[in-house]
Amino acid sequence: MEKDTNKEKSAIEENNKAELKKNASGLWQNVKEFVRNLLEIRHDTDRESTLEAVKKDISFKGHNAWILIFSIFVASIGLNVSSTAVVIGAMLISPLMGPIVGVGMSVAINDVETLRKSLINLALMVVLSVLTAYIYFAISPVKEETPELLARTYPTILDVLVAIFGGLALIVAKTKKGTIASVILGVAIATALMPPLCTVGYGLAIGNLTYAGGALYLFSINAVFIALSTFVVTKLLGFPLVRYANSKKRRRIAQIASSIAIVVMIPSVILFALLLQKQVFQSKARQFLTETVRYSGTEMLKYSSDYNEKTVEVYLIGNPVPGGTIETWKEQMASVEALKESQLIIHQGSDQNEDIAALSSQVRTGILEDLYEKNQAIIENKDARISLLENELAKYRGDGFSFKDLSAEARINYENIKELGYSNQIITNFSETDTIPTFIVSWQDGISNKQRIEQEERFENWLRVRLKLDTLSVKTVN
């Protein structure tokens, strides 16, 4: 009886396990089906329309040529005045993207004729863009190195990543039935093909070949990875290969296209790896200096990291850092994987070398400039307030004449004046307030009342003419 019970339990457990496996398998199938339906783009891909649209955008003549010229001028102006909004506007109207996408797609489908047209048109666009930018910067009176220009003088890992994912977004949008225009415009802004070409023209115009070469390098990186992204997506979506009547020719064309793809892909992968290593090196160096290179009473003036030379230089001021602490820093830096082969170079104020002196001078100059600008603003504000208050005070003081000179003239003209006083009297009727210049006169005792009144009237009339005042008051005191 007990054995039968055990068998029943085992059978139930096996049934439960089988049911769980079945449910798990069903759940996994549902998840796979959901993900496939979410990310599947093959069924919504319009291959014929995509090929037609790409070939149409490759053409570079007439309207496209003028649009490119005008957009280059707009972009150059934006870079020249460091206006991001203007540069973005120029990228939106630029037709540079067409030939680059054409290169990637033609290689993927073995279309030699389209590849030839794409390369020719791309070369023409590049030459015309650089020439237009060169002309603008050559005649422009403003040739300062703005942040917008300097940002396009050398590629970074971020530029590569943007070109890769931007190119993927672009070709996926183009292959969709009913092209997504907003995506194409967004990619044109993100990948920024035009500003580097403008910077090439700027570098040539000012004779700085380093800027020109770095900007051309950045443009090449963007173009290569956009074309590479187009190539990959075109292959994944199964675009049909171009058919040739001669099978031998078809194989030869396929070999040429594959060779081009390999030639482009291998250096691109190597470049991506190098830029990634450089970016990691700089990031780790910055993190190490921020977290580790600290000492009480010491401040870091400046630091620099050179990936090629494998050096990290730090400039310190304040309390000298002991040699033992510096050695500890070097050991800690060697434990960081990205920095283990690098050399830490410490410059301290005690070294009294030219670098520290120059940096200290720059810091002092910067501080003095800030203090001068702030104090100048404060002084100008105070001067304005003082001037305003003086003008207001002048209304009450009756400024505009010398009381000493006036009293001397009065003594000559009116010999019977014994004393003369002056003040501004503020009078109000509780609805208006006014200030009246008031003169207080004391006359000699020997004159008659009639003479005093006559003298007082003449004195008041004289004061009105002398001071050019319509309103004043003269009071007599005994």
Image (spheres, rainbow, N blue to C red):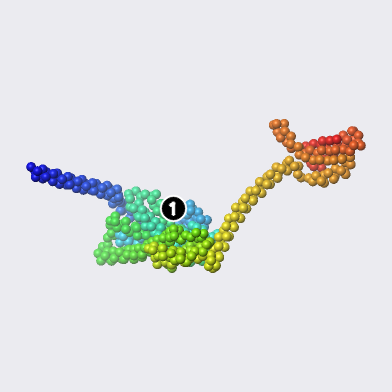
In the image, 92: left or right of 462?
A: left
Give residue 19's position: percent from left, percent from top.
Answer: 18, 45
SS of the residue under disc 1: helix
Q: Identify the residue at image location x=38%, y=63%.
A: 335
- Residue visible at 29% across and 60% down? 242
Query: Where is 40 relative to 321, above or below?
Result: above
Please say if 377 is above or below 130: above
The quadrant of the picture occupied by the C terminus is top right
Residue at the image point whose x is 50% and y is 58% from the top: 147
Q: Is residue 388 visible?
A: yes
Q: Residue furthest left?
A: 1
Q: Nearer the viewer, residue 235 or 375?
A: 375
Image spot of residue 469 (x, y percent): 78, 40
Give residue 286's position: percent from left, percent from top: 44, 60
Number of labels in the image equals 1
Any part of residue 132 in sight: no
Give the residue at mark 1: 92
Q: Position of residue 62 (x, y in %)?
A: 43, 57
Q: Quadrant of the N terminus?
A: top left
> Is 128 drawn above or below residue 444 in the view shown?
below
Left or right, residue 173 beside residue 6: right
Q: Amino acid at mark 1?
A: Leu
Question: Closest to the observer: 301 or 461?
Answer: 301
**Residue depicted at 19% across the width and 48% down the height:** 21
Q: Nearer the viewer, residue 419 or 125?
A: 419
